[in-house]
Image (cartoon, helix red, strand yellow):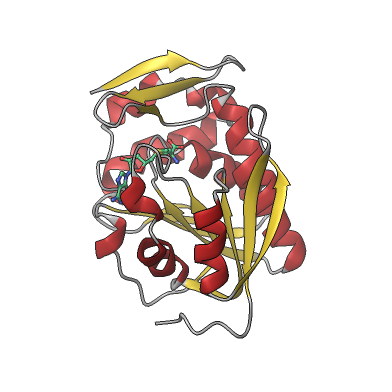
Amino acid sequence: MNILTKTADGSNTLFNQTIGEHYHSAHGALQESKHVFIDAGLKFAIAKNPNQEINILEVGFGTGLNFILSFAHCEENNIHLNYTGIEAFPLSQDVIEETGYKAYVSPEIWEKFINKYDATLLNKQKLSSNCELTIAHTKLIAFDSKAKFDLIYYDAFSVQHQPEMWTNEMIAHACSFLKVGGIFVSYAITGNLKRAVKACGFTIEKLPGAPGKREMLRAIKSAHTSMSH
Ligand SMILES: C[S@@+](CC[C@H](N)C(=O)[O-])C[C@H]1O[C@@H](n2cnc3c(N)ncnc32)[C@H](O)[C@@H]1O
């Protein structure tokens, strides 16, 4: 169902045959992850709110590339990371190892992730004194959480290939788990997505996209939202 392929920056991605799309940009999986989620998301969130702790929710955990880069950044900067991934169709540990993403983090970070990967699908796991990971094996629509998050990585397949992930209801559901002042980032920036986050009381910013994409979206949940659970 998933075929390993190389992207333009030399990093691998998976092509999902059922959906008909890659897990990452064909222009570069690694550079997209760094540009959209680490630089425009994580680094911005830390600068905006320099606590020594951050709670991240990722929609579409997939291979865990966004997670391992976030884990490495937080370890380097001594920030406590509480990370929840939502994943309807978790990959096997073998497939994740075949991605070659081990090369992009230290051996310690990789081992801590890969050794506990299967367990994170069942329960929250402490990967280090500074990092907890849980992967909710569920569809986004069925996800619930009492905890609220500082940052959402919205990394679903595109609206062309999986339109149900981009409806106003689905975006509002994901955004309901964000704290006031929290940040939403996505590689995508369609008119409908902008309208959907604005309807949830977000202020939007268009940023230069990762190579191959003109723009990306960053949105901040304002104090006046009416969309909290
Ligand atoms: C674009 S890929 C994510 C890439 C991922 N962030 C990575 O770095 O590998 C989209 C992911 O969403 C997952 N997915 C598909 N439908 C979903 C749903 N209804 N709820 C949650 N996840 C879903 C897919 O299985 C896939 O892993």
- Residue at the spot x=67%, y=42% of the render? 215
- Residue at the spot x=64%, y=56% of the render? 218
- Residue at the spot x=49%, y=64% of the render? 196
Q: In terms of image quadrants, where is residue 15?
A: top left
Q: In terms of image quadrants, where is residue 221?
A: bottom right
- Residue at the spot x=28%, y=62% of the render? 141
- Left or right of 2 in this view: 195: right
Q: Position of residue 134 (x, y in %)?
A: 36, 55
Q: Position of residue 21 (x, y in %)?
A: 38, 28
- Picture quadrant of ligand 1: top left
What is the total number of numbered labels drawn onto the structure image?
0
Q: Position of residue 96 (x, y in %)?
A: 36, 28
**In front: 218, or 66?**
218
Q: Is residue 67 above or below residue 228?
A: above
**In front: 153, or 192?**
192
Q: Is residue 188 visible?
A: yes
- Left or right of 179 in this view: 64: left
Q: In terms of image quadrants, where is residue 51?
A: bottom right
- Left or right of 111 in this view: 30: right
Q: Position of residue 94 (x, y in %)?
A: 29, 25
Q: Is residue 86 visible?
A: no
Of all residues shown, which one is farthest toward the front?
Answer: 191
Q: Quadrant of the C terminus?
A: bottom left
**In front: 219, or 134?**
219
Q: Is residue 109 above or below residue 176?
A: above
Q: Quadrant of the N terminus?
A: top left
Q: Is residue 31 above or below residue 225?
A: above
